[in-house]
Amino acid sequence: MANHVCETIEEDISHYLEHRGFHSSLQQFTQDRIRGGEDASNSLEDIAEGFAEAFTAGNHVDLFILWMAHVPSLRFESDGELDLLSNTKKAICLEFYLNLHFAIYPFRDENMMRCTSAADASAKCAKGMAVFRRYIEGRGQSLSQTPEFVQFYALPYIPSPPDHPTFAVMFTDQWMNELKNKLVSFVMSTCVADSPAKMPAIFSKYNNNNSNSDSGGREGNLAQLSQKLYSMNCELLQSLQQSRKTQELATDDYIENSVRKLNNFHQTMTNLSLSSTPPQLQQTKNHQQQPKAEPKHNANTFYSSSSSSSSSSSLIAPIDFLTVKKDLFNLAKNSHGHDIDNAFQTALILQALRWRFSRAPTHEARLNVLIAYLRNDILCVSKSSRGTKTLFETLLLHPSPIIAEYAGRFINSITTMNRARQYLMTNEGESCVGCLVKVLKSEKGDTVLRQQVLGSLQKSSLKRFAQLEMINRDVMGWIAITLDEHVRESQILLDYSLEYITALLMNLCLRTRGKEAAESAKPDLLSTLTSLLESENVQVRNYVNGTVYSLLSRSNMRDRAIGIRLDETLQTLTKVSSDQFKRQLQFILDQLISSSGEVESDDDDEDDEGDEHEEAALNLEESAEDGGLEDYTRNENMPSGEALLCANYLIRDVNSARMETALDEEKAAGGRKNSGFEPRSFDQDNVIRRAVTPHSYKN
């Protein structure tokens, strides 16, 4: 079949040469046919040289023609994640960096010097950025959540990339040469040479399409395209007309001339008797200006980390926190009733702020993000920024479920670090704990919001102030009721909630006042905890053992334990438990049969945590998010995460950006120097006697 197609092609070429009188060419072609054709495909060395030349010359079109011809098809998973095949990952990443190279190519000094004027240079730079923006909004969108590339999604919004500290490294010769070497190496190891069988396949496909196509298809497609072009230009000109009174986007002469040309085009379409011809554009000078739509806010921050950078510090794109807080206040204020757009936009900003923190590639980067948040009082909890209601309260107590939930997710995420917990306790921070407790008690059922608030309270319970505040607000009573419902199976808790409730209970019971509250709590906590001694969840058993051990330091609780035969239960469990839990149970049993128990000491002047608890931040847990927010961004064609923050809140003044970054890094460096950061190791054979969080205790 292939030989037959090749013979047909060769005969057609011979007839064409004879018809045009190309006798010498026909004679040579005939001789070549007799000898038989030879494989003329390019070698990999020639292909690599072509790639290198196009790269050096900044020839975007030539390079990607070669790319499409020689690079195997790139595969993506259905959810947009990269395929696990290493060559595919390399190809996708390299393709991104090549597009990045051509975007900044016009900005390089040697290319600027070749421009004939400033206008010429500006036009070339704008064109390069426009091409790159189309790429990241289309084919390159799959990398938008990958830490290595996320910072580059803000590049089209930077007015002068060479002067921006984040992107300055890309304008060095070293960066360009390294990328060129990677390209050549990839071509030599991965690409494929030209296939000699492509021409017959194209010829066969063309003939098949011609035999099956409708003769009027081309004209119909052109007619539809004309209508679309006309409609699009009408909308554009109407927009220009509406903005003429307030913005000098175009002169009156230009607009009227364009309207006249479009109306002539409209007449041509009418003469062709096209169906559903769009209405003619009216030349109306005195029109009523339509109100401008409020811009939709989508917040996405980005990290300025490069894969080739050996620096231990990850730069963070500085954003305008004042505008962020103002938008959060205004959007939340206008999100009552059925206004879903404002609620989703508020949630998107909170999600972006959380992702900037939780998805930071290193502990140091996460610390820099947090310091920027605290220095700018992101939740307006400090006394100096307080009004009648803090942003913390406005968001967490909001009637919109999605705003409250994403506020809870953000707070739970940042409280994994000690600095954030200190921030919530500063000045009038009491209202933060009170607000969290209010939400905890008001939520019916084990909802996502209640889980997030519970996680925040448990982490805050490492602070003495927060412990006492929770005890005063009868959190102990809520715990007693909730655990009793779980044990009686009237309302089963998820593992996350059960772990954090028992961990919170243990932390509160380390205080004298906490033991007193547990002793008077109804239903009886000791009976409930006895039922949880056999829990299948290892973490829950650890916290329950620690709580029971702490409570048995009080004589009244020991008497109550003897009354419910806790000693017999412990002895029975000791026989069937692992060595780890056997030793823990023996400690509890020794405490129970002790005549005096431990000497109680009210250490309420001390906190139960140190900087080592920040290790928990390296193991951030995030419950799965439903698809509502993702569907909204897709349907509205809105950015999310890093892209949103950079699009709406990026500080564009280079000096201000450098100052913001320097301040945050200086503060972070000071904190690291003074903290003596060292993870705490726990002896899991013993019962826990200090306040912990689930992630600081897990191995």
Image (cartoon, rainbow, N blue to C red):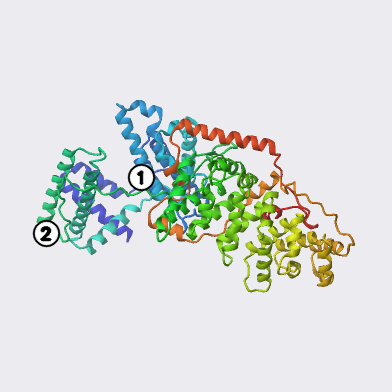
Type of amino acid at the residue the image marks with label 2:
Ser
Q: Quadrant of the C terminus?
A: bottom right
Q: Are marks 1 and 2 in contact (CB under 8 Å)?
A: no
Report helix, strand or loop for mark 2.
loop
Tell me where residue 632 appears, x and y as whole percent.
41, 58
Query: For residue 121, which quarter of the picture?
Result: top left
Tell me where residue 538 appears, x and y as whole percent.
72, 63
Report helix, strand or loop for mark 1.
helix
Residue 44 visible in image? no
Along the viewing direction, whichever of 612 and 157 lies nearer the viewer: 612
Along the viewing direction, whichever of 323 and 97 lies nearer the viewer: 323
Tell me where residue 493 appears, x and y as whole percent.
63, 67
Tell me where residue 658 appears, x and y as whole percent.
50, 32
Q: Quadrant of the N terminus?
A: bottom left
The label shown at residue 273 is 2
Q: Which residue is mark 1?
A: 65
